[in-house]
Amino acid sequence: MSERAAPFYCPYCGDEDLRPSEQGHGAWECAACNRAFQLKFLGLLARGLQPNDARGDGI
């Protein structure tokens, strides 16, 4: 098993000063904005990654 993946920046303020939280697996604390958040892996999609040529974005 590999080590847990660490987030590169806070999802709230964008700062990179993150530390693992004592709240458990996947919990992180941001020293810049004083927020705590948790990351959770939900699983793999059954269809995987496929190009969406039929619908398109219309951008």
Image: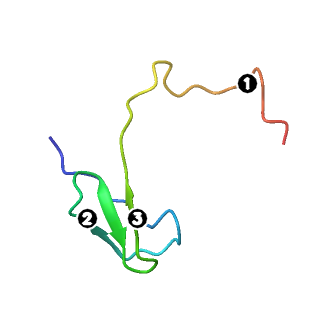
Question: Residue 37, image x and y in percent?
Answer: 39, 59
* Dot 2: element: loop
Which label's residue is closer to the chain start, 1 or 2? 2
- Residue at left offset 36%, top offset 44%: 40
Question: Pointer 2: residues within 10 angstroms few (<14), some, or many (20+)?
Answer: some
The furthest residue to the bottom: 32
Question: Residue 44, image x and y in percent?
Answer: 40, 28
- Residue at left offset 52%, top offset 66%: 12
* Dot 3: element: loop
* Dot 1: element: loop
Is residue 52 rendered to the left or right of residue 31? right
Question: Residue 8, image x and y in percent?
Answer: 40, 64
Closest to the camera, between mark 1 and mark 3, is 3
Q: Nearer the viewer, residue 52 or 46?
A: 46
The furthest residue to the left: 1
Residue 53 — which label? Answer: 1
Evaluate if marks 1 and 2 touch, with contact meaning CB atoms under 8 Å apart.
Answer: no
Which label's residue is closer to the chain start, 2 or 3? 3
Q: Is residue 57 above or below residue 25?
A: above
> How far separated are the C-alphas under marks 1 and 3?
32 Å
- Residue at left offset 78%, top offset 30%: 56
- For the N terminus, the quadrant is top left
Closest to the camera, between mark 2 and mark 3, is 2
Dot 2 corresponds to which residue? 21
Residue type indicated by callout 1: Asp
> How far separated are the C-alphas under marks 1 and 2?
42 Å
Residue 8 — which label? Answer: 3
Residue type indicated by callout 3: Phe
